Amino acid sequence: MEQFMKVNGYSNSYWGWGGEDDDLGKRIISKGYSIERPDSVQGAMTMIRHVQREATQPKLVLSLVSNATLRMTKDGLNNPETWRVLQVQILPLYHYLLVNVGKPPVEWFRSTNKTLQNKDGDVYDYNGDEDAISSPPMDTKKTATSKFENYDYMD
């Protein structure tokens, strides 16, 4: 946890799929830490369902990743106005944090009149206006495990 705090955690600028891991990697390396990968038994994983981005979103990701170390001092754990911790579990191999990250910004969406669904199956309407994403109030929202896997598009 100490290292995670020293790199200011994850960026709060990524939504959807991709880039956040590269950003965190740059933060880790810039602070002089190394990244170790577990063997295939301990490090087994299952990829979650995700959708392919439109052409504008990879440009957003590339722009963010390219200046990751410039943003790291002001974008992450130290700007809590963008997120709220709902639950913390200290486990033997990792710490589990349940975090409400609020609404995704409008520039991350392909087009208007989309419906979003988070990983727990809650559905939100989006009509091209960032205030038009309907969701429960922050204190009652039961989801938001992380902004990187929270929303999928539904056509």
Image (tube, grey):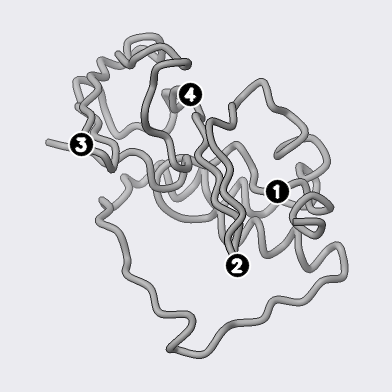
At a point 76% along the width and 42% down the height, the residue shown is 71
For marks 1 and 3 on the same chain, the one whose residue lies earlier in the sequence: 1
Q: CA distance from mark 4 to mark 2?
A: 29 Å
Secondary structure under tag 3 reads loop
Crowd around label 3: few <14 · some 14–19 · many ≥20 (10 Å):
few
Q: Residue shown at 44%/27% (left/top)?
A: 104
Instruction: Say which element carries label 4.
Output: loop
Q: Specify the amino acid type for callout 2.
A: Pro
Q: Which label is found at residue 102?
A: 4
From the image, tell me which residue sits under label 2: 92
Residue tagged 3: 121
Count the numbered circles shown.
Answer: 4
Which is more foreground, mark 3 or mark 4?
A: 3
Pointer 3 or 4: first along the chain:
4
Residue 9 is marked as 1
Q: Amino acid at mark 1?
A: Gly
User: Which residue is most to the left?
Assistant: 155
